Image (cartoon, helix red, strand yellow):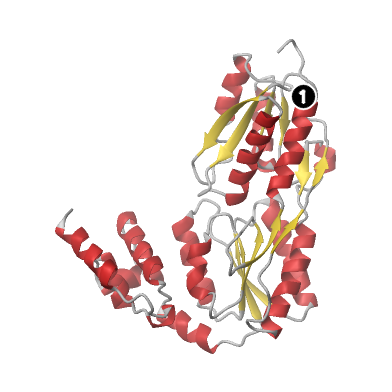
Amino acid sequence: MGSGEAARSRRRSSKPQSQSPLNVTMMAVAEEAGVSRATVSRVFHGTTPVAPSTRDAVHAAAERLGYIPNEMARSLAASSSDIIGLLLRGPSNPAYGLLFSELQAEISRLGLQMITVAPSPMEGANFERQALNRLLGLRVGGMFVSTGVIQAEMLEPFLDVVPVVIIGRPENHPRIYSVSYDENGNATLLADAVAAQGHRDVAVVIPNVGSSVAESLRGRVMAQRLEGHGVTVHRIPSPTFGVVKEGIAEVMALYDAGTITAAMFPSDVRLLAFLSHARAAGVRTPEDLSATGCDGVLPGVDLLGITTVRIPVEQAAVRAAAVMQSMLAKPGRIKVEHELLPGTLLPGRTLGPPRGGR
């Protein structure tokens, strides 16, 4: 162990365990990370570029200490605002875009206001953490989080000073209220439909949890459910954040080898990317290869005819807004729940029985 790492280890072991996140200083984070205070300032305020390894070390130290930047702490501690913040993952994604419009309409109907911060679709956890900091710095009275990247532990330092509701993705943190899509149920509906058509060799694209909590869960549950039906599952990992075409080459290789008769994708955007590639390669769906997606919110999804599950975005927006209104009216008195909203199977035309002797 190097001297710098050893020093950081000693600092971690000796730091006060009862210190409030609102009282943790930037200098404390600098000492924990083994960098200068100026470097910590650059990381959180984005004044000049910082090396990725240094940025990661600063964020890790901040998370260990529960650090909230000073201007955010002052704003949050004094806040009684009726402005709600929304941290939104990629509004260009139809599911998130629809949630934004429905939630905005519902918040307005309740007489509240909403400010939205949305990182670039290609930005990962560190950038979403910075977006979270920017949002909190706007002195919001409550916060919606709708992203599959920000983890619950990143939100823990703020739970005592601002109400938080997670929308869409599954969440089981005992202190965070969530209004989520029932991804276990959604994945089960799709896997059962594929197995019922008689498919016995199926490819399933599974993103890692760091890319999307929801899509990773969908993929894993689809694979497990298929195996419960006696289906041979070919798991295709998708580790790269934001790359919807990842896994297509592997699916096509399995098809060309005569190994699979169906492929399952954890989102409709991924499915459409595959269908475009398959058409260019002369592969017909479902005549040659069946394929399914998930979320069902694309405009004209009925005309596209894709086999998917429609997630209840509108219902989630209404419930989340109602919960937030109650939290603002009765601070600290709303029991934390984890609501699960079931989806609806859309049979479509991209799923059929195996053909061609495969």
Which residue occupies 50% across, 70% down?
A: 156
Find the residue positioned furthest to the top: 357
**85 versus 338 height, above or below:** below
| Snapshot quadrant of residue 326 | bottom right
Q: Quadrant of residue 304?
A: top right
For label 1, count other residues whose C-alpha is less than 10 Å away and answer few (under 14), some (14-19) or many (20+): some
Relative image position of residue 287 (x, y in whole percent): 78, 20
Above or below 335: residue 212: above
* Quadrant placement of the C terminus: top right
Q: Residue at x 63, y 19 (%)?
A: 255
Instruction: Give me the residue at 77% from left, 70% from top.
Output: 105
Residue 193: x percent and y percent? 78, 33
Tell me the residue at 84%/39% (across/down): 303
Q: Residue furthest left?
A: 3
Asked if residue 238 shows in the view, the reply is: yes
**Is 44 located above or below residue 213 in the figure?**
below
Q: What residue type is disc 1 on?
A: Pro
Image position of 50 (left or right of 257): left
Q: Position of residue 350 (x, y in %)?
A: 78, 30
For disc 1, the marked residue is 286
In-image side of 38 versus 236 (left or right): left
Percent position of residue 68, x then y: 43, 76
Left or right: 352 in relation to 143: right
Q: Viewed as shown, does residue 47 lie left or right of 222?
A: left
Whether residue 294 appears in this view of the structure is no
Disc 1 on helix, strand or loop?
loop
